[in-house]
């Protein structure tokens, strides 16, 4: 026996937009205690759904890229001081 998704989701359903900041969406999801949020486009049509796991993965990737950039910026200074 199947269930209708509208019977399982909170009302109103949590919504975000593609341009929203990852940290703010994560904060909203944590505050509302939800694991998924509907992504809507400019016309408020459903564009997709994002999970807290998706957002954590995106934040980790962003942190990794930042660390790589900082490492690349520091490398010439480290090389010069070791000579």
Image (cartoon, rainbow, N blue to C red):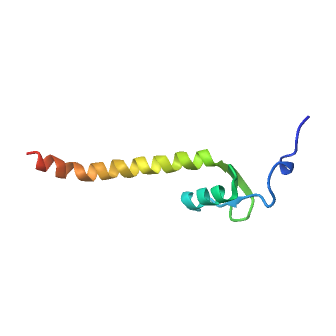
Q: Position of residue 12 (x, y in %)?
A: 79, 61
* Outermost residue toward the left in this view: 83
Which quarter of the figure has residue 29? bottom right
Does the rendering let one see residue 40? no
Quadrant where the C terminus sits is top left
* Outermost residue toward the right in this view: 1
Q: Residue at horizontal 62%, vertical 48%? A: 52
Q: In front: 41, or 1? A: 1
Q: Residue at horizontal 47%, vertical 46%? A: 61
Q: Position of residue 57 (x, y in %)?
A: 53, 45
Q: Is residue 44 above or below residue 56?
A: below
For the image, the number of numbered tags is 0
Q: Residue at horizontal 38%, vertical 52%? A: 66
Does the rendering let one see residue 46? yes
Query: In the visual, does 10 lie left or right of 53?
Result: right
Query: In the visual, does 4 lie left or right of 43?
Result: right
Query: In the visual, does 70 lie left or right of 29?
Result: left
* Outermost residue toward the top in this view: 1
Q: Position of residue 76 (x, y in %)?
A: 19, 50
Q: Residue at horizontal 91%, vertical 34%? A: 1
Q: Position of residue 6 (x, y in %)?
A: 85, 51
């Amino acid at each position: 026996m199947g269930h209708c998704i509208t019977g399982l989701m909170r009302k109103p359903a949590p919504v975000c937009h593609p341009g929203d900041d990852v940290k703010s969406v994560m904060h909203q999801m944590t505050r509302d205690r939800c694991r998924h949020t509907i992504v809507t486009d400019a016309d408020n049509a459903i564009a997709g759904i994002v999970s807290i796991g998706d957002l954590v993965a995106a934040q980790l990737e962003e942190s990794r890229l930042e660390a790589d950039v900082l490492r690349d910026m520091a490398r010439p200074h480290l090389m010069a001081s070791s000579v």
